Image (cartoon, helix red, strand yellow):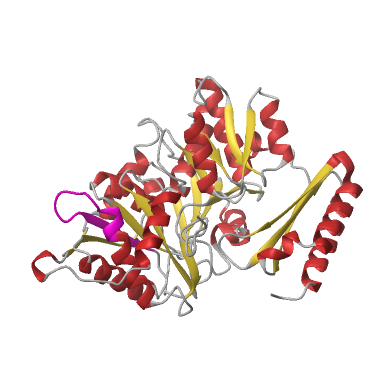
Amino acid sequence: MSRQYFGTDGIRGKVGEYPITPEFVLKLGWAAGRVLCRGHAGKGKVLIGKDTRVSGYMFESALQAGLSAAGVDVLLSGPMPTPAVAYLTHTLHAQAGIVISASHNPYHDNGIKFFGADGTKLDDEIELAIEAELEKQLDTVESSKLGKAQRVVDASGRYIEYCKSTVPRNLDLTGMKIVVDCAHGATYHVAGSVFRERGAEVIEIGVDPDGFNINEQCGALHPELLRAAVLDQGADLGIALDGDGDRVMMVDHTGNILDGDDLLYVIARHRLCGKGLGRDKVVVGTLMSNLGFEKALARHDVTLIRTQVGDRYVLESMKQSGLVLGGETSGHIICLDRTSTGDGIIAALQVLAALSGMSRSLNDISSEVSKTPQIMINVKADASVVNNQTTKAAVAAAEADLGDKGRVLLRPSGTEPVVRVMVEGEDDSQVERLAHEIAAVIRAEPSL
């Protein structure tokens, strides 16, 4: 069965446009409560967290009402990173966690994502069960069985301590100056404390959320702001998180911007020293993972497995194969021996532990990766354009031009109405030319 509402990362869209409306989200809370707490002795409880978007207040209330109507108790954490909700769901013994966030999207978008009791994203079957429940008439349990709500007053403190526990106790960042950009998002009140309490001198930017400035020219999507701050402050490195804290980019002391591939390589190199990759020496990436990253891993006899784009697919592959390290170029990095989902703060800590353990700088280790030129262009278009003959012909022509020295990837986004055009090859000018040629063909297609 195909999913009607759920995409690759929950349900997402523009606030006020169906299904991101108060009415739908209220019923979604009711449907999710019925499915996720089914069979639980007693009422069951669900944790709700959110990022800093102004619409979060509205949707928090709607979800709370729907869950209560289904007879489910609610725990409210307030603004918290997505991975923090995953962790707290498990540690508070809730039957599910819900995050109100559109991740890296601008403030006028929002979304709802779910975690199961174990802190991992829901299986397709459960999402389909929730969608089936949405087709039913909402009926409220009798008053004596309505769910209640309460605040989790120590949520941020619990998560800060958890993050610090994922690296060795003797990791001392004293003498290191770090700039942390929280994108005016959900990590604004926790990220700085994590690194500061490990001894670092921390300069914080992007920590003044007003409901509207989340991800606005800052954070992991716009690391140029971090780069400027690192150079201006003479910092050792910089850490850029996205609006909900599950992505990370970093900047070294020279101003080089390092993406998920670079950071995965640094972590993998360190783990090779202590056999932290497991006996199979495998890292999971995606179709977007850079060829230069794959070649750098291969020089150390580490295999890269590629999945579809999306951290849920990376996680599925890791779990199926019993692997511990994987991620995406975009900065979703999953260390399954440390956490159950992608976590920007924990990934950054793993990088810092690698630098300390290898007594090398971020610039030094990451320079071992020689990236293959790659360009990605986002084109506003219907997903169906990927399969039309004109587009296919443009892709075939580009592939013929590249020969065996590059590749083309065309894919609809799972989170916004765009088609992503990626071209990778050995020659910068050729890669850029071919990507723009394909993008122009897609733009010329009539909208559906």
Front in this rendered view, residue 7 or 326: 7
- Name of the residue lying farthest toward the right: 401
Q: Residue 43 magenta-drawn?
A: yes
Position of residue 275 in the picture relative to residue 46 (left or right): right
Q: Is residue 181 above or below residue 320?
A: below
Above-or-below relation of 55 to 261: below
Q: Which residue is situated farthest in the bottom direction here?
A: 16
User: In percent of the image, x 40 and y 75: which residue is there?
Assistant: 54
Query: What residue sits 50% from the left and 75% below the top?
Result: 108
Seen from this angle, which residue lies furthest left?
A: 144
Query: Image point 48% across, 66% down: which residue?
Result: 12
| Residue at figure coordinates x 23%, y 48% from the top left | 92
Residue 371, quarter of the rendered image: top right
Q: Nearer the viewer, residue 171 or 336?
A: 336
Magenta residues (range): 33-50
Q: Can I make out residue 338 in this image?
A: yes
Residue 145, given in percent of the width and then of the height, sits at 12, 64
